[in-house]
């Protein structure tokens, strides 16, 4: 879900000096919406087949010359095209604030919550003798092989970020970013499988389940300096980051 996304930045090629370890082939930077210095009020709605209904809103209000707030919201109810019983419902919200008490200090903060509720669909079984899915050999593609009174999928995400920018002088700026987040993945689903020992047209229904909670705490501090040596201009960035990620399954 990306209703809270302002833009997606794509960095191609080695990018470890900008994006951290593990980005030798590039990186994706997802920029979360922030409060801005102008007023706007936006809303979008979507209506589609299979009872698809979705609405989002995005509001930014300048409270004073030094304070701005932004609120985002999303709600969706939808079935899945071409599948019986399967649905994908979700809702979420964002709150962001920007405070600039002086020309040299800027504080921004935001909090995001998303809640996704769905009936997981693990597909259709494969007809080995026919070398094709059962839905290509006479079974309706809409056929759902799970248990509608048992299977479920619940995904929630909460994260908050506080960022401070402090201009120490015309040539030095300190930036500190702190984030705390938690995500939960909870589901029971049914994987339809066929084995060569079964009678034709029958399947094994293999249950799949997971309950996983991930917590992340991170803090990043940067010092950016700018100076000239003759006609050459220089920019240096010094930084330190500490983070901890804990996952329980």
Image (cartoon, helix red, strand yellow):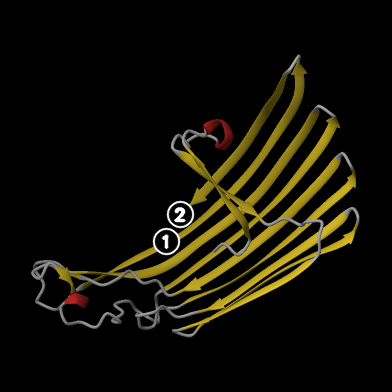
Residue sticking out furthest to the top: 230
| Residue 18 position in % (x across, y down) | 58, 34
In the picture, which quadrant includes the C terminus? bottom left
Q: Is 42 or 202 nearer to us in this picture? A: 42
Q: Report which quarter residue 25 is drawn in.
A: top left
Residue sticking out furthest to the front: 231
Residue at mark 1 to residue at mark 2: CA–CA distance = 7 Å
Q: Is 86 or 5 nearer to us in this picture? A: 5
Residue for point 34% across, 65% down: 208
| Residue 241 position in % (x across, y down) | 64, 34
Q: Is residue 163 left or right of residue 104?
A: left
Where disc 1 sits, the SS reads strand
Residue for point 27% across, 79% down: 141
Residue for point 54% across, 64% down: 1
| Residue 103 position in % (x across, y down) | 89, 42
Q: Is 104 or 222 nearer to us in this picture? A: 104
**Looking at the image, do the residues carrying marks 1 and 2 touch, with CB atoms under 8 Å apart?**
yes
Which class describes the residues within 10 Å of circle 1: few (<14), some (14-19), or many (20+)?
few
Is 32 rendered above or below residue 52? above
| Residue 95 position in % (x across, y down) | 73, 62
How many numbered dots are placed on residues in this image? 2
Which class describes the residues within 10 Å of circle 2: few (<14), some (14-19), or many (20+)?
few
Residue that badge 2 annotates: 249
Q: Report which quarter residue 174 is drawn in.
A: top right
Residue that badge 1 annotates: 210
Where disc 2 sits, the SS reads loop
- Could you tell which of marks 1 and 2 lies nearer the N-terminus? 1
Q: Is residue 82 left or right of residue 16?
A: left
């Amino acid at each position: 879900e990306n209703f809270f996304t302002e833009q997606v930045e794509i960095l191609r090629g080695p990018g470890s000096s900008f994006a951290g370890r593990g980005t030798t082939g590039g990186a994706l930077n997802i920029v979360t919406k922030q409060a801005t210095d102008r007023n706007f009020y936006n809303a979008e709605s979507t209506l589609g087949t299979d009872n698809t209904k979705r609405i989002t809103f995005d509001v930014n209000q300048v409270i004073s010359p030094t304070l701005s707030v932004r609120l985002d919201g999303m709600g969706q109810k939808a079935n899945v095209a071409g599948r019986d019983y399967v649905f994908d419902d979700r809702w979420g919200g964002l709150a962001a604030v920007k405070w600039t008490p002086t020309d040299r200090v800027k504080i921004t903060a935001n909090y995001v919550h998303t809640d996704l509720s769905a009936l997981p669909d693990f597909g259709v079984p494969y007809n080995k003798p026919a070398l094709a899915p059962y839905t290509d050999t006479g079974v309706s593609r809409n056929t759902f092989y799970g248990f509608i009174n048992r299977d479920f999928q619940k995904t929630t995400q909460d994260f908050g970020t506080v960022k401070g920018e402090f201009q120490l002088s015309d040539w030095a700026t300190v930036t500190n970013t702190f984030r705390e987040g938690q995500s939960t993945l909870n589901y029971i689903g049914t994987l339809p499988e066929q084995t060569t020992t079964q009678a034709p047209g029958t399947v094994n229904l293999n249950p799949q389940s997971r309950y996983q909670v991930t917590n992340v705490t991170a803090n990043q501090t940067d010092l950016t300096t700018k100076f000239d040596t003759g006609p050459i201009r220089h920019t240096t960035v010094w930084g330190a980051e500490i983070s901890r990620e804990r996952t329980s399954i």
